[in-house]
Image: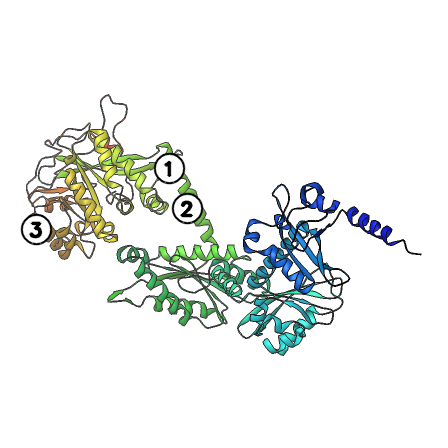
Amino acid sequence: MPPPPDDADVLYRLLVEGVKDYAIYMLSPDGVVVNWNEGAQRAQGYTADEIVGCHFSCFYTVQDRVAGVPERSLGIARETGRFEAEGWRLRKDGSCFWTHVVIDAIHDSGGRLIGFAKITRDCTERRAAALKLETALANLDLALSNMTQGLCLIDGGGRVVLANERLCQIVAAPSCEALAGAPIRELLRDGLSEEASALFARDHLRSDLDCTVPALSEIVHRDRILSVTTRRLPDGGCVSTFVDITERRRFEDRIQYLALHDSLTGLANRAALHAVLDEALASSTGEPWAILCIDLDRFKPINDTFGHSVGDRILQEVAHRLRRAVPAPEFLARLGGDEFTLVLRPDAPGRLEGTARQVLDLLGQPYLVGRLSVRVGASIGIAVAPPAGGDPDTLLRHAGLALQAAKKEGWNRYALYEPGMGERVAERASLEAELRRALEEGAFALHYQPIVRARTGAIIGYEALLRWPRADGEAISPATFVPVAEEAGLMPEIGAWVLAEACREAAGWPDHLTVAVNISATQLRSGLVIQAVEGALTGSGLAPHRLEVEITETALLENRELALCLLRRLRALGVMIALDDFGTGYSSLSFVHTFPLTRIKIDRSFVRGLGRDSQSTAIVWAIIGLSRSLGLAVTAEGVETEEQHRLLARKRGLDLQGFLFGRPEAPPRGTPGATGPRPQPPGPTTGSETSGGSGGRPIAARGPRSGSAMAVPRGYDGTA
């Protein structure tokens, strides 16, 4: 049976007061706290003695009280019987906590309002968790909306559960909501193509996909490429991402193209050539095919003179002409600079040389760049496989050897590789190595050839001539080692040594004697000749007017502007300047007019014909007359006979040089104070001027150790 009414009230009161997780208390009709349980004390910090009799608005923040929130809460409960809400409330210590509040209106049996029952629950932790989850969901939504990849969650039936904005764009859907619940195959079919839908189903919707390994594939639709990745989920669904890689693929293709092509001409490059040669060698069935190495002949001076923009235009035109010269199936590459390579499969032995001649003819035609018309020309080296080598490097090296051989024969030529070419290159490399050692060890020497007055036979100076006496006693001709030194880039350093040594020797001679030193084209090209001359003069103390530098027309032709600038600076130092081998070049008169010359040296080829060849004689007299009118000194080179000397001695103020007066000799060694050649003064038998009818030897003046001098072939110096 139920307990008596009084006992029931006691039990209910004890139950309410014992609840610790909820604040349960009664309010009077006007909101005053009537009672207080333990849960209220724990939640809000007040004891029953402290709070009973206080208005419940003390639990609200100042802002809520000012806004009338407590009164509205009671008003709603009074009118509707119940008020429920969440909000911030205050504890006794002033701290805030988030609460869930329920206020129920209490009426007596007659329906009269006797108060309110209020239940308050502390939901601070729950709210914090909810806010954290809400923030995470918002961030997730933000991330999904701004992903560059299209993403969708697909259930086990192939329907879209979740999709982001990017996927909507890819499949041209109106909104993400429109995708939810739609079959993914239909979306891909409508937004892309039936083929794309079928490919996705085949590669990504199979039930046997491994959950640990993503499925990858590409879908090509019109001009777009999509990369698709799908991960299978344990519940049978999957997550797929769609990435538009169209631009990336185009960029990769461009990178791949640039890796195998020359950016200036669009031709294949060295890497592509090696790949083609590797493939050709691997698949060769024994039929011949050839490599043609093509190098432009006069490209560098044009590039240096007119600038790289003109040079680039010429290279592009060369590539265009080569494409026209070569049938479509053949292979064409630019290896860099002005070097091109052509791969041919000759169907007949004569086709190689015919193609080479055709290429030379095409490349030799004028190039029109703007209003500028220039000619370049080319040389070609040919290597035929398999005889010339079984790997790309060997074939290219042999074609390069043939190219060098073609260039040695002159411009606009071709040559086929022969086995002996490698040996000659090896010998040349060995000679270059020896030259470098000789330069490091100071193994070079200078010999001196006298220059005399034509009428008196008096020695006025010497020309310094470079010699290389090797350790084994063999003397190498300058004609052999100087070209190697030129190609190896050693001549500026060797030339500086010649200048310094010649000036040092000449400084010990009598003051009226001069020394002539040849300046090579590479010395001028390097621009270091000024420093070399200044260093030689300063180091030796030789007066500048006693040094005469000799330069050839060929050296001046390479870069007229640079040569003119350098020679003017030399002349400003007081150094004399002679034009060597005059009369052999086509621009001699313009050189005499333009450059600051002090002397002209008549080439031996004209002197040789004196008295025998009327044309040579006329040329020599004309050069002498021209020089006199311009105030230039004149030296006739290569005087070797008494008749040549007799004829030349008729001309006033002429100087002579040749074997008749002395061969090039080393300065005497071991003699105290001897620092150079010892000129012999003219005497009855060594320097007297003879009459026109005398048949005796007019000049017997010799240089040092005249009886032991060795004849040396003509080379670097132009006289010996």
CA gap between label 3 and label 1 equals 43 Å
Q: Do the residues labelled 2 and 3 touch (CB within 8 Å)?
A: no
In the image, what residue type sits under mark 3? Gly
Q: In which quarter of the image is the C terminus?
A: top left
In the image, what residue type sits under mark 1? Glu
- Which label was assigned to residue 658? none
- Which residue is more in the foreground, 511 or 198? 198
Expressed as whole percent of the image width and height from the top left, the position of residue 295 reads 38, 59
> Which label's residue is closer to the chain start, 2 or 3?
2
Residue at 19% across / 47% down in the picture? 565
Q: In this view, does 224 lie to the left or right of 494?
A: right
- Which label was assigned to residue 428? 2
Q: Can residue 638 be seen in this view?
A: no
In the image, what residue type sits under mark 2? Arg
Q: Which residue lies furthest to the top in this view?
A: 672
Q: Is residue 621 visible?
A: yes
Disc 3: which residue: 625
Q: Quadrant of residue 101?
A: bottom right
Q: Quadrant of the N terminus?
A: bottom right
